[in-house]
Image (tube, rainbow, N blue to C red):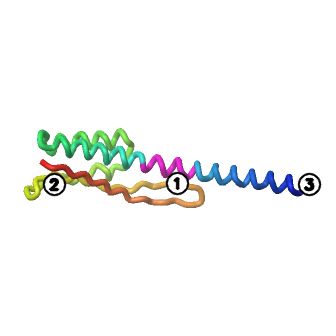
Amino acid sequence: MVAARKKGRMGCLLTLLILAAGSYYGVEVGQSYVRYLRMLDEMKVQARFAPNLENDVILRRLRAKVDALELPREAKRFTIRRRSRPREIVITTTWQDTLNLPFVIKIVTRTPEAKASL
């Protein structure tokens, strides 16, 4: 009877430990991914407004967003290409996020790309 209770407690503690570790890892990875999605969304917005904006204005707005999201400096190196066939704009950038996880440091390369017709 006592041994069964100890097994039950250990199972509960192990489950709580796994949930805590998963939450800790998930928060770090999740924050990185949310910053990526927000930058991608801003790039798509700027691509949609591109027919009415010059590249310098688009760059200024995107670089301000990089600062607001506290992304690495390398994320400010945007490439803006306006193509004639098909008539479209393509905005790209790339940066590396360092995820400091327990027992491991993971480097993730983010490469968002936004396209819109002109």
Q: Residue at x 85, y 54 (%)?
A: 6
Q: What residue is pinned by disc 1? A: 100
Q: Earlier in the sequence, mark 3 or mark 2?
A: 3
Q: Residue at x 9, y 58 (%)?
A: 85
- Disc ID at residue 1: 3
Q: Position of residue 38 (x, y in %)?
A: 35, 44
Residue 118 vertical placement versus 3 (above, below): above
Q: Earlier in the sequence, mark 1 or mark 3?
A: 3
Circle 2 or circle 1, nearest the eye: 2
Q: Residue at x 46, y 46 (%)?
A: 31
Element at badge 1?
A: strand
Circle 3 or circle 2, nearest the eye: 3
Q: Earlier in the sequence, mark 2 or mark 1?
A: 2
**Dominant SS type (magenta):** helix
Element at badge 3?
A: loop
Q: What residue is pinned by disc 2? A: 81
**For residue 91: magenta?**
no
Residue 10 appears left or right of 113: right
Residue 99 appears left or right of 57: right
How far is the residue under mark 1 from the one under mark 3?
43 Å
How far is the residue under mark 3 from the one under mark 2?
72 Å
Which residue is farthest right? 1
Residue 42 appears left or right of 118: right
